[in-house]
């Protein structure tokens, strides 16, 4: 029996590495993580403004998002995890740069690329502060894009890399990344649409089987096979700067 600090004896069992990893994963996938996630709608604001996206169609839209964009990003999340899982001896900074460059090429909308890169760099910076790691420090030092003054580090790749460093399994990382991605979009829709808390919770609940299916599908997809086809969402992201009044950055 173990006594918690300053307290009476309890039934708590000794802390295990698995439990600690789970707790860290919960924090990394929390929407309250201070990386700026709540400031981005990834084009949804444009679709709502154009009356293309409604509450009635939200569930089906987000399901497609998971199957397309979600799967693409989870494939890259898993690949980044593989880069870190072998330790510093097998980590390749060249492959890390190639991975982020390839994902940039697969995101046709500049606004979505910039949002993903901003979140990724913020996430990696925070992860480096939380865990002293040669891999995280080296990855966050990726050379900046000429003329832009920022590093190309996409959120999904940064998430997978950090989970690899923390020895969180790739499957758990994939599920957590997908879930937090769609949860953040539901949260954005609560500010854009007449979507109440109960209805939002029901949509997120109903999407969980799709999250599982997408995570499983990403496990058997290679990076050079990964693709996403959501032209409506790309249009929404490209159109976003033209909206006269905006709640979100993207």
Image: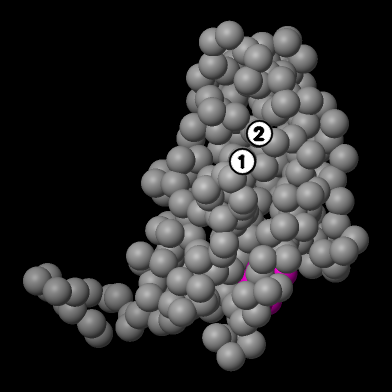
Residue 64 vertical placement versus 78 (above, below): above
Tell me the crowding category of disc 2: few under 14, some 14 to 19, or many 20 or more residues within 10 angstroms, Cα based.
many
Q: Is mark 1 on a helix, strand or loop?
A: helix
Q: Quadrant of the C terminus?
A: top right
Q: Residue 62 carries which label?
A: none
Left or right, residue 250 beside residue 58: left
Q: Is 197 in front, or is 214? A: 214
Task: Judge left or right: residue 101 versus residue 26.
Answer: right
The image quarter containing residue 56 is: top right
Q: Main secondary structure of the magenta part?
A: helix
Is any atom of residue 171 visible in this view?
Answer: no
User: Which percent across, then down, holds residue 107?
Assistant: 76, 44
The image position of residue 76, as x and y in percent, is 72, 61
Please state the extent of the stretch shown in magenta in the rendering.
79-83
Residue 82 in the magenta stretch? The answer is yes
The residue that mark 2 highlights is 111
Q: Is residue 75 above or below residue 57?
A: below
* Percent x, y of residue 14: 33, 83
Q: Which residue is depicted at the point 60% across and 16% down?
A: 193
Look at the picture and state if 112 lies above or below 50: below
The reply to whether the C-beta atoms of the residues labelled 1 and 2 are less than 8 Å apart is yes
Observer-nearest residue: 96 or 85?
A: 96
- Kindly give the residue lying farthest to the bottom in the view shown: 89
Q: Can residue 24 be seen in this view?
A: yes
Of residues 145 and 211, which is closer to you in this image?
145
Residue that badge 1 annotates: 114
């Amino acid at each position: 029996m173990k006594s918690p600090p300053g307290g009476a004896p309890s039934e708590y069992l000794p802390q295990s590495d698995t439990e600690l990893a789970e707790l860290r994963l919960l924090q990394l996938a929390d929407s309250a993580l201070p990386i700026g996630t709540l400031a981005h709608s990834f084009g949804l604001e444009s679709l709502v403004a154009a009356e293309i996206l409604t509450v009635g169609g939200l569930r089906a839209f987000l399901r497609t998002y998971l199957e397309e964009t979600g799967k693409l990003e989870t494939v890259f999340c898993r690949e980044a995890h593989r880069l870190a899982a072998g330790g510093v001896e097998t980590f390749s900074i060249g492959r890390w740069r190639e991975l982020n460059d390839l994902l940039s090429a697969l995101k046709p909308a500049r606004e979505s690329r910039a949002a993903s890169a901003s979140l990724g760099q913020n996430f990696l910076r925070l992860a480096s502060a939380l865990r002293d790691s040669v891999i995280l420090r080296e990855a966050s030092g990726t050379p900046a894009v000429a003329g832009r003054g920022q590093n190309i580090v996409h959120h999904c790749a940064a998430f997978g890399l950090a989970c690899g460093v923390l020895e969180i399994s790739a499957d758990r990382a994939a599920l957590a990344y997908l879930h937090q991605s769609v949860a953040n979009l539901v949260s954005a829709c609560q500010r854009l649409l007449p979507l109440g808390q109960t209805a939002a919770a029901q949509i997120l609940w109903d999407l969980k089987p799709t999250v599982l299916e997408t995570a499983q599908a990403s496990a058997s997809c290679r990076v050079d096979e990964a693709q996403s086809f959501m032209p409506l969402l790309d249009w929404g992201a490209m159109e976003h700067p033209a909206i006269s009044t905006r709640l979100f950055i993207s």
